[in-house]
Amino acid sequence: MISAAEPWARPHALTVQGQSTYAQRRQILELPEFHKLHTWLDSEVSTYLDLVGSVNKVTVINSWVNWNPPESSTDRHSHQLSRVSGVFYLEAEPWCSPLRLYSNQRQFQGYDFISRETDYNQQYRDIGICRGRLILFPGWMEHSVPKTAGPRTVLSFNTVFV
């Protein structure tokens, strides 16, 4: 399945030392080899929207594969036009670097000085990864991948309201 996307892999500005099909404008989830995965992802996104109380429906607008060798990283960024963004780990070992999701709460804390970090005021949360794991989050949420110890291959996607 992954090999179907490899011909379009190129360096990408956000993926330090890695490769991506993002800039090629190929919709990876529309390739026949990804049909079953696409169907499953649509179902998971619908469940996510229900869990967060959304009545909206979305559709995948773009999808791509990133290949990250050891020592690579992905710079902090967001997907502002996406309602729900997702990362599905096609290949990854649990000891690889996590997906780092950043909180936007600091801008609302004003002059509320924090004496210690807790689960309720962290600036970011590291989400552990492994092969087959799907992580969904709002497109506006900034995220990154610290320098990774091992190789990882991920399928990422963005959605918009239908």
Image: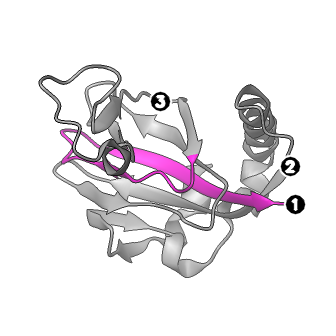
Q: Is residue 31 visible?
A: no
What residue is at 70 percent from the left and 31 percent from the top? 52
The amino acid at mark 2 is Lys
Residue that carries the numbered disc 2 in the rendered image: 57
In the rendering, which numbered label is found on residue 67? none
Residue range highlighted in magenta: 138-162
What residue is at 43 percent from the left and 47 percent from the top? 153
Residue that carries the numbered disc 1 in the rendered image: 162
- x, y percentage for residue 120? 35, 23
Determine contact: label 2, label 3, CB under 8 Å: no
Residue that carries the numbered disc 3 in the rendered image: 131
- x, y percentage for residue 8? 52, 74
Work out whether mark 1 precedes mark 3 in sequence or the reverse, and give the earlier one. Answer: 3
Disc 2 from disc 3: Cα separation: 27 Å
In the image, taking residue 13 as reference, residue 38 lies left or right, namely: right
Work out whether mark 2 precedes mark 3 in sequence or the reverse, and give the earlier one. Answer: 2
Q: Residues within 10 Å of mark 2 (few under 14, many from 20)?
A: some
